[in-house]
C-alpha cells in the first residue's frame, strides 16, 4: 500500500463540489487534521484504516487524526462539502479527538440534525472569518461542530496509552524522517519496545514501519523536485535516503515513475493529497481575475463579509432555539 503523510498548510481548508466537477477521490494518506465529508447528493466509498464505508446522500463522514484513508468515487456524480480542520482549533475537545476512535466514522442522515446543518452552512463561509475577533468566533463554531459530531458518533473502548504511543511515534517520525530513523532509534528516543512499535504499525496503521518512513521521505522528495533546483542526488540525501539506489527504488514504488519524470511533469506545482489538482482547478487558475469562486478556501483568506456572517450566525441561533 502506498501511503503519504500529509503536512497541511492551513488550519482549515474547505472545498465544495456542487457542480459535479471534482470527483471525491484521492490517494491513500493520513494527517493530523480531522477530515469531514458531507454528502449533499450522491454516494461514494471511504476506506479508513482497514475498513470500507459507504457514504450516501445526507451522510457525514468524519476521519479522525492519523487515520489512513482514501475515497473512491466511481460515478463522478457527487455533490459534497469537504472540510479539513486542525483539531487544535477546538482546544476543549482536541484531547478527546486525539485519543478516541469511533466505531464507525459515518453519521447516517446527518442532514436531519438542524444544528449540524447550520454549522456546516457557517463553516462554508470560513473565508470571511479573517480578523482576530472573528477567528475567535470561528473557533467557537468549530468547537460546536466537533461537539455535535462527538455526540453522534459511538466510540470504541479507548486505549489512551496505545493512542498516545501512536501519536508520539507519528509526531517523531514526521519531524525526523530526513535523519537516520529505525525501530531501534525510536525505541531509544521514545522508550518504547521496537517490537511494540512494529506491532502498532502493522495492526493500527496497516503499514510496515519502513514503508511508512519511506512514504514520508518520498513526499518530501516530491516537494523538492517540484519547488527546488537541487539535483536528484542532492534531493535523495536531503529527503533522508541513504543511497541513490534506495531512493529511486522507493520513489518508483510509490509514485509509479522515476524522480526525473516526476519533476518534468510537476515542476512548480504544489498539490495537496486530500485535494488533488483537477481540471476544474486548472480552469480556476486561468480565471484568477474573474468572479469564479475559489475551490479551496484557507482560513487565512482576507475576504470579509460581515453581513453574511451575521446572517449565518442568526441562522444557527435560530436552529438551536428551534430544538431546545
Image (cartoon, grey):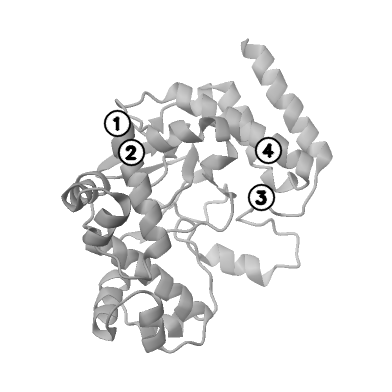
* Residue 252 percent location from the top left of the image: 28, 76
Q: Do labels 4 and 3 touch, CB within 8 Å?
A: yes
Along the line of sight, which residue is nearer the eye, 194 or 63?
194
> Between marks 1 and 3, how big is the CA–CA gap?
33 Å
Q: Secondary structure at mark 4?
A: helix
Please report contact status of discs 2 and 3: CB closer than 8 Å, yes or no: no
Q: Secondary structure at mark 1?
A: loop
Q: Is residue 133 visible?
A: yes
* Helix, strand or loop under label 3: loop
Question: At 49% across and 28% down in the image, what residue appears?
Answer: 149
Pointer 3 residue: 299
Look at the picture and state if 250 lies above or below 118: below
Q: Is residue 59 left or right of residue 157?
A: right
Relative to 246, is 12 on the left or the right?
Answer: right
Which marked residue is nearer to the observer: mark 2 or mark 3? 2
The quadrant holding residue 96 is: top left
Identified at 31% across, 51% down, the residue is: 190
Q: CA distance from mark 2 to mark 3?
A: 29 Å
Residue sitting at x 54%, y 45%: 86
Tell me how many marks there are: 4
Task: Choose between 14 and 143: the one closer to the eye.
Answer: 143
The numbered mark, 1 or 4, whose residue comes first in the sequence reads 4
Q: Which residue is mark 1?
A: 159
Question: How far is disc 2 from disc 4 in space, using C-alphas?
Answer: 28 Å
Question: Can you identify the residue that label 2 sits on?
Answer: 163
Q: Is residue 323 above or below residue 151?
A: above
Q: Would you name the residue on which mark 4 appears?
A: 138
Amino acid at each position: 500500500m502506498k501511503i503519504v503523510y500529509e503536512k497541511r498548510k492551513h488550519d482549515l481548508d474547505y472545498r465544495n463540489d456542487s457542480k459535479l466537477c471534482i470527483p471525491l477521490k484521492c490517494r491513500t494518506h493520513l494527517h493530523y487534521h480531522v477530515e469531514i465529508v458531507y454528502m449533499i447528493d450522491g454516494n461514494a466509498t471511504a476506506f479508513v484504516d482497514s475498513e470500507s464505508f459507504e457514504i450516501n446522500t445526507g451522510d457525514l463522514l468524519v476521519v479522525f487524526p492519523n487515520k489512513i484513508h482514501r475515497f473512491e468515487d466511481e460515478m463522478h456524480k457527487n455533490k459534497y462539502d469537504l472540510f479539513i480542520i486542525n483539531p487544535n482549533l477546538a482546544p476543549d475537545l482536541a484531547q478527546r479527538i486525539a485519543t478516541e476512535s469511533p466505531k464507525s466514522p459515518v453519521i447516517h442522515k446527518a442532514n436531519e440534525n438542524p444544528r449540524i446543518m447550520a454549522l456546516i452552512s457557517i463553516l462554508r463561509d470560513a473565508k470571511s472569518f479573517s480578523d482576530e475577533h472573528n477567528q475567535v468566533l470561528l473557533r467557537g463554531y468549530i468547537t460546536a461542530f466537533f461537539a455535535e459530531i462527538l455526540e453522534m458518533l459511538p466510540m470504541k473502548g479507548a486505549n489512551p496509552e496505545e493512542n498516545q504511543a501512536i501519536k508520539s511515534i507519528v509526531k517523531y517520525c514526521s519531524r525526523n524522517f530526513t535523519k537516520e530513523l529505525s525501530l531501534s532509534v525510536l525505541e531509544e528516543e521514545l522508550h518504547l519496545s521496537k517490537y511494540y512499535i512494529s506491532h502498532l504499525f502493522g495492526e493500527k496503521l496497516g503499514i510496515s514501519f519502513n514503508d511508512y518512513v519511506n512514504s514520508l521521505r518520498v513526499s518530501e522528495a516530491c516537494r523538492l523536485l517540484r519547488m527546488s533546483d537541487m539535483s536528484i542526488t542532492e534531493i535523495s540525501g536531503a529527503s533522508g535516503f541513504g543511497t541513490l539506489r534506495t531512493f529511486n527504488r522507493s520513489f518508483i514504488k510509490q509514485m509509479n515513475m522515476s524522480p526525473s519524470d516526476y519533476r518534468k511533469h510537476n515542476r512548480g506545482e504544489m498539490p495537496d493529497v486530500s485535494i488533488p489538482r483537477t481540471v476544474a482547478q486548472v480552469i480556476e487558475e486561468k480565471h484568477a481575475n474573474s468572479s469564479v469562486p475559489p475551490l479551496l478556501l484557507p482560513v487565512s483568506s482576507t475576504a470579509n463579509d460581515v453581513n453574511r456572517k451575521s446572517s449565518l450566525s442568526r441562522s444557527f441561533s435560530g436552529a438551536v432555539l428551534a430544538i431546545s
